[in-house]
Image: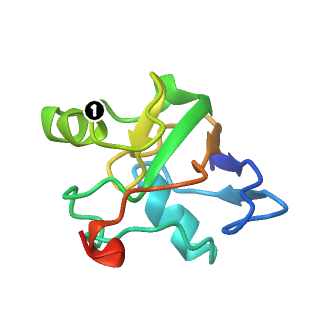
Amino acid sequence: MPRIIILPHQDICPEGAVIEADVGESVCDAALRQHIDIEHACDRACACTTCHVIVREGGDSLSDMDDVEADLLDQAWGLEPESRLSCQARMGHEDLVVEIPRYSINHAKEGS
C-alpha cells in the first residue's frame, strides 16, 4: 500500500504525517480519512482550488491531469510546476511527498 508523506503545515498538520492510501484513491480522500483537514470547498467536485497541493516526490505515479484540473490550477495560489488538485490526483503504486500550501483561495469563505 503506497504512503503519502505530508510535510508540516502550520495549521493543518503541524507535525507532518505519514498516511497509507489505496491505489486509485485521491490524495484528498486519503488525507481526510486520516483526519488531516485539507480544504475542499467544492466537496471534491473539481470546481475550486482549495485542495491544491504541491507534489514534491512521486508525482509520476499519480493519475494524469485532465484539462479541467489544469485550467483550475491556473487560478491556485502559489502554483508550481508540481501542483495538483488533491481531489483529482489519484494514487498509483509509489509513495508521495506532498506539501499543502500555506494559503488557498476560498471564495466561499472569503465572501468574494
Image location (x, y in percent) of residue 4? 65, 49
Quadrant for the C terminus, please: bottom left
Instruction: Farthest residue to the left: give it.
Output: 67
Residue nearer the viewer, 66 or 11: 11
When the figure is inspected, residue 89 is found, relative to residue 42, above or below; the finding is above
102 or 82: nearer the viewer: 102
- Say if 80 sits above or below 29 in the image: above
x, y percent for residue 35: 62, 78
Q: Residue 96 appears in which quarter of the rendering?
A: top right
Residue at x 45% of width, y 65% of height: 29
Front position in the image: 96 or 107: 107
Residue 15's x, y, as percent? 85, 61
Q: Amino acid at mark 1?
A: Met
Residue 56 drawn above or below residue 103? above
Residue drawn at 30 percent across, 38 percent down = 73
Residue drawn at x 57%, y 64% as measured from the top left: 31
Q: How is the image coloured?
A: rainbow
Residue plotted at (45% across, 21% down): 81
Frontmost residue, 29 versus 8? 8
> Exactly how many numbered labels are in the figure?
1
Based on the displayed image, in which of its 4 quarters is residue 20 positioned?
Answer: bottom right
Q: Is residue 35 toward the left or the right of residue 82 in the image?
A: right
Please state the horizontal and vertical placement of residue 43, each as a whole percent of the image: 29, 73
Q: Secondary structure at mark 1?
A: loop
The residue identified by callout 1 is 65
Q: Callout 1: 10 Å neighbours few (<14), some, many (20+)?
A: few
Does residue 53 appear to the left or right of 70 in the view shown?
right
